[in-house]
Every structure is written in C-alpha cells, then in structure tokens.
Image (cartoon, helix red, strand yellow):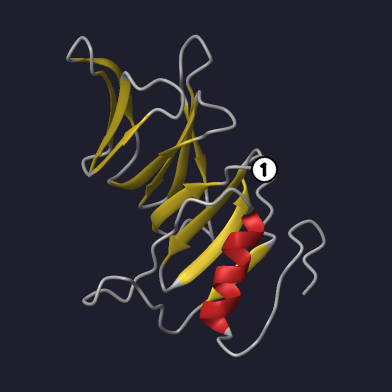
Amino acid sequence: MLVCFHPEDPDLLLVSEKVGVLRVYSVERGCSTLFLRCHGPLLDADWSILDPALIVAAGSKGLTVWNLASPQPCSELVEIGGGERVYNVEICRSTPGLVATHSSPHTVRVTHLHSNKVPVAVHLKKIPSNKPTSSLPSLHHSHDVNTWLCLLAKISFPNAHQSWDVKTRLQ
C-alpha cells in the first residue's frame, strides 16, 4: 500500500491498495473523491509534478496510467520489458512523460510513457539498499533524470565515473 499527497493540492491524498484499487481522498471532507481500478495488484504509484492530473501505478503487468483531466478517466496499460511485473515507479520531476521503474530480476529502466522508448535499461546482480534486510532498489525523487543515471552508474560501476545523455543514449 502506498499513500502520498497531491503535488499541488494538499487536500488530495492518493492511496493505492494491493487489490488493484487507487483511491483519492479529500482530507478536509474525509471522504473518497475518486476510485480507480487497475488489472492485478498495485505495488506502487506516483503523481506527476509536471502534469498533476497524471497518475502512474506499478503492477503485475507493467504500468497503468490515468489522466484525471479527461471527463472520464480511463486507464492505459504500458508494458515494461515485455509485460514484466513492476515493483516501483517514479515519475521524472523535470521531463514530461519520463519514468524510472524497477522490475524483476533487478532491472531498472528509464522509459518514456508516450513513445515506449527505453533510453536506459540496467540489469544489476545485487542492488544496495538503505534497508539492511532488503536487496531491492528504491527509486528516489529527483529533479533531473541524470541524477537517476548517475546513481545507476555508481551502483553498477562503483569505481567508474560515467554519465549518460538520455536523448542520445551516449556514455
């Protein structure tokens, strides 16, 4: 289960449930204002800062994307890595449509939602974590996708100094 506030409206609270339901609650009114269902269990979700009407959820078949600005929000399934289970999702804070995902087995990808292009995909044998009992990665909020890539470089190649250009995929 994930709980997070809307990036612009502190009254709205997003709650994702493992049974495949996203609920948006009004804190002031104390009631649910929106109910969204997705296929399969939800493992993570994120609001977009650049487009606050966009919600992306991680699940057993990939990503589910909702645009709440449309009169009747409907979900769109975005397959990641051929429909792999996605454990974590993080929407880029500076580039529209760019998301970072963690899927099994220990694969971290930076994907563009609208074109389904994968500028970066890294398979890691073991991923260090800030939790002593976990070897799974955690995606952290970043204002720049290059921060994600530098973190991936440090994890994958701890003694190397590498950076990537997301648009050209150059090292």
Residue 166 is situated, as x and y percent measured from the top left of the image, at 73, 59
Q: Nearer the viewer, residue 77 or 8?
A: 8
Q: Residue pushed farthest left? A: 30
Amino acid on which the number 1 mark rests in the picture: Thr
* Quadrant of image for the N terminus: top left
Which element type, helix, strand or loop, lies under badge 1? Answer: loop
> Which residue is at a point 45% across and 56% down the rendered structure image?
140
* Quadrant of image for the C terminus: bottom right
Task: Quadrant for residue 114, please give it.
Answer: top right
Mark 1 crowd level (few <14, some 14–19, many ≥20, 10 Å Cα): some
Q: How many marks?
A: 1
Residue 45 is situated, as x and y percent measured from the top left of the image, at 38, 42
> Which residue is at a point 42% across and 40% down the rendered structure image?
46
Q: Is residue 11 left or right of residue 157?
A: left
Q: Nearer the viewer, residue 130 or 1?
A: 130
Q: Is residue 99 left or right of residue 164?
A: left
Query: Measured along the vertical axis of the image, is residue 131 above or below residue 56?
Result: below
Mark 1, residue position: 95
